């Protein structure tokens, strides 16, 4: 694995230069929000930031995506593909938790049996540059409880580690190596930097605040689809989509046709298990009759069903749902409470 | 405030113990320092969980409606003579009581189904303003000391004058004491500081050229990710099926097309004429910080200046859209 060194003050310039010829997604400040956006001319990519409010899943699994278009003509129906050509892109500044979310999502969208061409194409064409958490940004971080690590390079093509004056750039994949080559002639990293990285890694791990018994609850979830505990979470829930939309691993979607006169498009858009509409059937019957069942679905999906299907918890411990839930429903508390049952 | 909290707990306990209510809706402490979370007390011994402080933000009237309606639904299959009424106690400040008033005016439930535990209010701390005050850093601890909010971030502590972090709707609120109540806890709160400036921001906005106003509207709506937290927290948004989710016919596309988002937002706002009590819940819950208030307040201003009505101000003041009189102003229809 190739390791290079990038001068700290040179990085922003490199990214901006890259954005002139390639599509670059990066965290930027937009008024009071810190968001992953397409880096356009005049925009400043953030290097010293906590984490973006929105998860970067949007670049592979957009909130709305046209799957195909159709047109009714005199000769019959004409079909065409959805969006135009998918471009090469660089996704910069992803935190290790979010980078890990792509590994989890790959399980689903790039399953040996079921391949999602929309997701896979974008994923293949995008190089991910992660920015390790030398200091985990929030007290709500709990990546280490769900198999992540603040300095992990899992899911990234290049992982940058802030060593003070320089970044240690670790290539994780051939895609990452290609990208580093494009960044110019960067000096190789020596052994001393490697040792420093290990030191930072150990310190960062200790800094992660929360320990959530995420693995310990699987056995309980297996046995307790019906349990009075499920009556205790949902009452204050507003049934909004904040947790699911900001979540890096939530991936449920809905497919709808939008037709205007002779033109139609089939779009896929994010769905949210928090919404009453989530599983309403055509007949009007809804198997999940209340927020209780919807909340059970969210917890089960993350900590049981996904584990059953892919042997991994569908949570990366980024803490977004904890921080941004308008009524402070805290997944850490739910998991901890279950572990005590 | 501690004293009010204590009395609230005592009163809630009493209501539950003597069976006056089935549940008391209030706030309890959350897992984050600046958060409270709505709670539903059914056991008198749990009343001690109730809190009343500057971080109680969400309008609880929404939950009163939800509980009573949920119960009604569950009774549908019971014989008429076996049907019971759910009685809900609620900790209510001024804006909450205005929302309850709207529910009552709109015949959503009967007055005897709700026991209003009125509390005086001096405004709540807006999470977004607090976050801006500490440059977006994570708040690790915070507490109100006198007239200031002491906030801890990993970069250290900072004292912010309370007035700078109170929600905008609180600063200009003229109804910070309950409009209706069954019991009033504590002394009435003094008037809020900026009551006379209530429409200042709207007036400044109205004075802008139309393209600038449109640019602001599109910019703000561009932030919306359609999570519907605003609608779902709003006590006046109680439709069983919202127009946004109807699909026969479908009014609005499900995607994030700019115009679909805008249509969702302004259609919802139009449903708020004479029904928005400026409780600030929609702003407080919005994860993206969309400035909905600028537009809702304009409707509120028109409601007051053209129709001499303020949402939920009194039981006998009929909602603007529910009454018609021959001398209703209509010039704005022809000369917007």
Image (cartoon, rainbow, N blue to C red):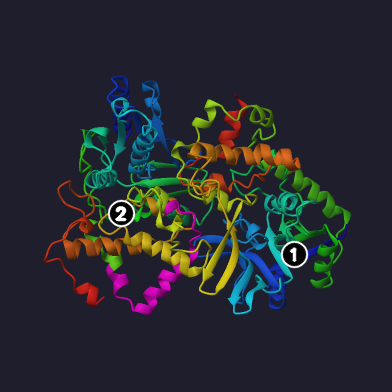
Tell me where residue B211 appears, x and y as whole percent: 38, 79
Can you identify the residue that label 2 sits on? Answer: B278
Q: Callout 1: helix, strand or loop?
A: helix
Residue B321, above or below A323: below
A192 sits left or right of B7 in the view: right
At label 1, counting other C-alpha atoms closer than 10 Å, the crowd grade (few under 14, some 14-19, many 20 or more) is some
Residue B156 seen in render: no
Q: Quadrant of the C terminus of chain B?
A: bottom left
Please name the predominant secondary structure of the magenta segment in the image.
Answer: helix
Q: Residue at x 31, y 20 (%)?
A: B17
Residue B327, above or below A287: below
- Quadrant of the rendered image containing residue A126: bottom right
Residue A86, above or below B147: below
A7 sits left or right of B283 in the view: right
At label 2, counting other C-alpha atoms closer than 10 Å, the crowd grade (few under 14, some 14-19, many 20 or more) is many
Residue B205 drawn in magenta: yes
Can you identify the residue that label 1 sits on? Answer: A121
Q: Do callouts 2 and 1 point to residues on the same chain? A: no
Tell me where residue B182 appears, x and y as whole percent: 21, 33
The chain holding disc 1 is A
**Distance in Å between CA atoms under marks 2 and 1:** 47 Å
Image: magenta residue range: B203-230
Tell me where residue A189 appears, x and y as whole percent: 85, 60
B130 sits left or right of A304 in the view: left
Dots 2, 1 in contact, CB < 8 A: no
- Quadrant of the rendered image containing residue B8: top left
Residue A184 seen in render: yes
- Which of labels 2 and 1 is toward the front? 1
Residue closer to the observer: A337 or B257: B257
């Amino acid at each position: 694995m190739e390791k290079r060194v990038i001068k700290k003050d040179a990085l922003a310039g490199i990214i901006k230069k890259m954005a002139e010829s390639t599509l670059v997604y990066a965290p930027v400040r937009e008024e009071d929000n810190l968001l992953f956006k397409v880096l356009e001319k005049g925009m400043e990519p953030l290097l010293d930031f906590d984490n973006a409010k929105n998860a970067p899943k949007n670049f592979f699994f957009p909130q709305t995506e046209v799957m195909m278009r159709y047109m009714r003509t005199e000769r019959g129906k004409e079909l065409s593909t959805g969006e135009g050509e998918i471009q090469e892109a660089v996704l910069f500044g992803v935190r290790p938790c979010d980078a890990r979310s792509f590994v989890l999502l790959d399980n689903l969208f790039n399953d040996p049996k079921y391949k999602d061409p929309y997701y896979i194409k974008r994923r293949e064409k995008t190089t991910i540059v992660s920015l390790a958490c030398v200091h985990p940004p929030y007290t709500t971080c709990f990546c280490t409880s769900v198999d992540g690590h603040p300095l992990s390079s899992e899911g990234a093509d290049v992982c940058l580690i802030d060593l003070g004056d320089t970044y240690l750039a670790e290539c994780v994949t051939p895609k990452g190596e290609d990208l580093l080559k494009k960044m110019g002639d960067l000096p190789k990293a020596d052994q001393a930097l490697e040792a420093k990285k290990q030191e930072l890694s150990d310190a960062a791990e200790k800094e992660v605040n929360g320990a959530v018994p995420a693995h310990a609850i699987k056995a309980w979830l297996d046995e307790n689809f019906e349990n009075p505990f499920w009556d205790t979470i949902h009452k204050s829930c507003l049934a909004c989509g904040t947790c699911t939309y900001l979540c890096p691993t939530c991936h449920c979607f809905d497919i709808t046709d939008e037709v205007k006169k002779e033109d139609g498009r089939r779009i896929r858009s994010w769905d949210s298990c928090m919404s009453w509409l989530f599983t309403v059937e055509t007949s009007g019957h809804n198997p999940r009759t209340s927020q209780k069942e919807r909340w059970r679905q969210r917890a089960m999906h993350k900590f049981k069903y996904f584990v059953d299907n892919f042997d991994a918890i569908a949570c990366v411990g980024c803490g977004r749902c904890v921080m941004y839930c308008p009524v402070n429903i805290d997944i850490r508390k739910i998991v901890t409470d279950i572990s005590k049952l | 405030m501690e004293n009010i909290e204590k009395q609230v707990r005592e009163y809630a306990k009493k209501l539950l113990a003597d069976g006056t209510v089935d549940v008391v809706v209030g706030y309890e402490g959350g897992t984050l320092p600046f958060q409270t979370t709505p709670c539903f007390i059914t056991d008198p011994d749990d009343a001690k969980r109730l809190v009343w402080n500057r971080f109680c933000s969400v309008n609880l009237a929404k939950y009163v409606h939800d509980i009573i309606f949920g119960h009604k639904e569950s009774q549908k299959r019971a014989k008429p003579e076996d049907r019971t009424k759910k009685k809900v106690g609620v900790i209510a400040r001024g804006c909450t009581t205005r929302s309850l008033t709207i529910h009552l005016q709109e015949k959503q439930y009967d007055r005897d189904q709700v026991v209003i535990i009125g509390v005086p209010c001096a405004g709540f701390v807006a999470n977004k303003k607090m976050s801006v005050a500490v440059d977006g850093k994570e708040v690790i601890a915070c507490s109100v000391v006198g007239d200031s909010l002491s906030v801890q971030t990993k970069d250290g502590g900072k004292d912010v004058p309370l007035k700078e972090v109170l929600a905008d709707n609180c600063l200009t609120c003229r109804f910070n004491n309950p409009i209706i109540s069954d019991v009033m806890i504590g002394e009435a709160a003094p008037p809020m500081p900026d009551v006379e400036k209530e429409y200042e921001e709207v007036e400044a906005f109205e004075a802008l050229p139309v393209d600038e106003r449109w640019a602001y509207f599109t910019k703000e709506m561009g932030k919306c990710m359609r999570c519907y937290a605003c609608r779902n927290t709003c006590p006046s948004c109680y439709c069983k099926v919202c127009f946004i989710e109807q699909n026969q016919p479908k009014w609005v596309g499900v995607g994030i097309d700019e115009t679909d988002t805008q249509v969702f937002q302004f259609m919802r706002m139009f449903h708020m004429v004479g029904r928005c009590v400026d409780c600030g819940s929609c702003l407080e819950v919005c994860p993206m910080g969309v400035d909905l208030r600028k537009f809702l307040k304009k409707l509120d201003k028109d409601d007051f200046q053209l129709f001499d009505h303020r949402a939920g101000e009194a039981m006998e003041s009929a909602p603007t859209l529910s009454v018609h009189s021959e001398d209703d102003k209509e010039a704005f229809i022809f000369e917007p």
